[in-house]
Amino acid sequence: MTQPLLGKLRHISLSVKDIEETARFYEQAFGMFRVRQSNVAVMMSDGVVSLAIISSTKNPNAEEREGLHHMGFLIDEMENAADRVLGAGAQYHGQINGVGKGPATERKYRDPNGIVFDIVTREHAERVWCLPQIV
């Protein structure tokens, strides 16, 4: 039996050599817009799903490799979601506290194949991605 939907795919993070070139590509090809930017990352969105483009050479979280870095899921409540993903076989990978403009938290896990994903609350996603409303 399929479980009820726990969360929505909120963002995908790519690790690349040239963040500016990659950001320009997604602007020109898909009309994505920049939400935030630093010297190690560009955060973009299409208004529904966000794209984090991180430098594989300058960002300490990028592990100096190119490709999919992680996926992020928007959830309603942290503890129930954490219990559910662990119960499904995920392995805890760490958490980041106080990201962006306030005391928000995201928790990171690895799926059974080792792919990293995070779960975040609506409050966190709105603060980090600076979007007024998340669909």
Image (cartoon, rainbow, N blue to C red):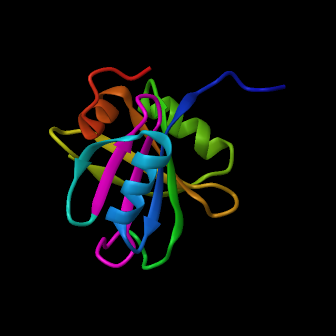
Image point (50%, 73%), residue name: 66
Location of residue 76 with respect to 19 vertically, above or below: above
Q: Residue lying farthest left?
A: 101
- Would you identify the image quadrant in which residue 56 lies? bottom left
Location of residue 79 with respect to 92 vertically, above or below: above
The segment highlighted magenta reads 41-61
Q: Position of residue 14 (x, y in %)?
A: 47, 60
Location of residue 130 with respect to 71 vertically, above or below: above
Q: Give left or right: position of 80 versus 27.
A: right
Q: Residue lying farthest front?
A: 28
Q: Position of residue 98 (x, y in %)?
A: 20, 46
Location of residue 62 with respect to 120 vertically, above or below: below
Image point (32%, 63%), residue name: 20
> Which sits in the foreground, 122 or 39?
39
Image point (69%, 62%), residue name: 113
Query: Does residue 45 belong to the magenta stretch?
Result: yes
Q: Give left or right: position of 14 versus 53.
A: right
- Would you identify the image quadrant in which residue 5 lies? top right
Q: Quadrant of the C terminus?
A: top left
Query: Does residue 34 belong to the magenta stretch?
Result: no
Q: Position of residue 8 (x, y in %)?
A: 54, 30
> Which sits in the foreground, 49 or 21?
21
Q: Position of residue 34 (x, y in %)?
A: 29, 44
Image point (40%, 47%), residue name: 27
